[in-house]
Amino acid sequence: MKALYYAPLLALFLVPGTAPAEEINGFDPTRSCSEVLGSTRGSTDQFMIAAWVFGYLAAQNEIMRPVSIANNQAVLGNLIKACADSGGKSLLDLVKANKPSEAPAGNAGAETGPAAGSEAEARALLSQFLQPNFDRHALTWSLKANPEEVREVYAEPLATKLIATYDQQLTQNVAIGPKPGQTNLLTWFATTDSLKRGGRMLEEFPGGYGKVAGYFKGNHPIVRFKFVEQGETLGMAFDGLIYVGGRWVWMPKPWRSLD
């Protein structure tokens, strides 16, 4: 009976007439995780994967988690991160490696991968955007911070303004990624506490961080990054990749939400 536990979860997203008007590919969990995650074309495919993971873990490990939009995004983000470190495992094997004490698809394979919250882990995640056939929209959407994560990094009143800004601007149509010919990744790694203290590290980040540094709470790894052509330093620049609550999230250009 346990093996069938995930069926009701999948049914939540498969009731006729409720699926979004988008292409639905479905997936085969016995295939390579990178192939499965790279072939998603919309939110329904992504929700099917997340719901299957929730159900599989509940059936095998008795790990019960609420199935929600925020948790689906967290699961997808963790899957993408773990897949990058998996050496080509199937999606099924990747989820099987999850231990009962861990969050859904949490750090499967992490014992052989980069440390959680490290620059190496951030680079492994961001390198996925350089793969030409990867679904950059899905990966970007999985990095969207939920309100609790925003409030864990930023104090009020900026936190509430950021939540409203990101809900409006960071939709499923937004995609991080390089321009054609930009095959290299540059990263700058710091912590929010080091930016708050100012000095050299703050100078490495966009000037707007000087305006929001006083709102930082705690001490979270933060990364700015660029996609550039070989040998170049100018390219597509991004900021605000932050490690909070056990996963990387994207909170770009926070100073734009200041009065």
Image (tube, rainbow, N blue to C red):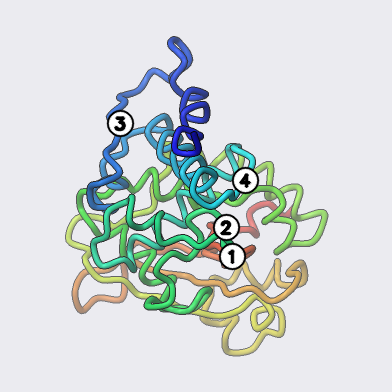
Toward the viewer: 134 or 59? 59
Q: What residue is disc 3 on?
A: 26
Label 4 element class: loop
Cα separation, mark 4 vs mark 2, equals: 9 Å
What is the three-letter code of the residue carrying label 3?
Gly
**First-in-chain label (4 vs 3):** 3
What is the three-letter code of the residue carrying label 1?
Gly
Which label belongs to residue 64? 4
Q: How many marks?
A: 4
Relative to residue 152, is residue 56 drawn left or right? Answer: left
Q: Which residue, as the protein is rendered here, is positioned at the far right? A: 156
Cα separation, mark 3 vs mark 1, equals: 28 Å
Q: What residue is disc 2 on?
A: 103
Cα separation, mark 1 vs mark 4, equals: 18 Å
Up-down: is 58 above or below 129?
above
Residue at the image point whose x is 58% and y is 89% from the top: 200
**First-in-chain label (1 vs 4):** 4
**First-in-chain label (2 vs 1):** 2
Label 1 element class: loop
Mark 2 in CB contact with mark 1 (< 8 angstroms): yes
Toward the viewer: 124 or 173? 124
What is the three-letter code of the residue carrying label 2?
Ala
Q: Label 1 neighbourhood size at 10 Å, few (<14), some (14-19), many (20+)?
A: few
Label 2 element class: loop
Cα separation, mark 2 vs mark 1, equals: 9 Å
Toward the viewer: 92 or 144? 92
Q: Give the x, y percent position of residue 258.
A: 72, 55
Mark 3 in CB contact with mark 2 (< 8 angstroms): no
Up-down: is 126 above or below 201?
above
What is the three-letter code of the residue carrying label 4?
Met
Q: What residue is disc 1 on?
A: 246
